[in-house]
Image: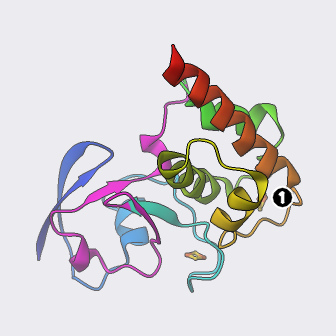
Amino acid sequence: MKISLNVNGSPRELDSAPLVRLLDALRGPLGLTGTKEGCGEGECGSCTVLLDGDPVNACLVPIGQCEGREITTVEGLGKASHLSPLQRCFIDEGGAQCGICTPGMLIAAEALLRQRPDPDEPAIREALAGNLCRCTGYQRIVESVLSAAALRREGAAQ
Ligand code: FES
Ligand code: FES
């Protein structure tokens, strides 16, 4: 079937069987390999993307359910030459190590900061509870999000 959707602000079309996973459509025909596969079973959060602004596990969403909808992947947050404050803070605070979990963490954190610009540490931990990381022990990730929240508030105040 033909599927039209909006990905990172651009209209995209693809021809796909409806049960193909959104994760595979993104990484395959849509050419966006930033979204990572960990468990493939909805447990690890590494495939998290925004679907109409809400974080979802792309390994559990059939592409057939994405007709006319808006997807945001990690590529939509910033560019290598122009990282978002959130991406910059993950680098500066050591929130990213091997990086497998990082795209999903960034997307989950982005969803949180859009809803709650000044989250405390428990709120960040709760928002990231579905995103597993084997490398950083979470503290640096939480500190990255706290720093990014402060930077975003500063930016918004200017
Ligand atoms: Fe989707 Fe783990 S790969 S939740
Ligand atoms: Fe390696 Fe999180 S940075 S799994």
Q: Mark 1 points at which residue?
A: 138
Residue 58 among magenta residues:
yes
Residue 133: x and y in percent read 78, 65
Q: Say which of 73 and 127 sits in front.
A: 127
Q: In which quarter of the image is residue 131?
A: bottom right
Left or right of 65? Residue 118 is: right
- Residue 65, placed above or below residue 158: below
| Residue 145 in view here | yes
Tag 1 secondary structure = loop
In the image, residue 38 lies at what x, y percent? 64, 73
Picture quarter with ligand 1: bottom right
* Residue in the image at 55% along x and 31% along y: 84
Q: Residues within 10 Å of mark 1 (few under 14, many from 20)?
A: some
Can residue 100 be seen by looking at this rendering? no
* In this rendering, position of residue 122 left or right of residue 67: right
Residue at the spot x=73%, y=70% of the render? 132
Name which residue lies at 33% across and 45% down.
8
Say left or right for 1 vs 77: left
Q: Depth check: 120 or 137 in front?
A: 120
Residue 50: image location, x then y, percent: 41, 59
Specify start and end residues of the magenta stretch as a single range. Answer: 51-80
Q: Which residue lies furthest to the left in this view?
A: 2
Colouring rule applied to residues: rainbow
Looking at the image, the residue that sits furthest to the top is: 158
Residue sitting nearer the eye, 118 or 136: 118
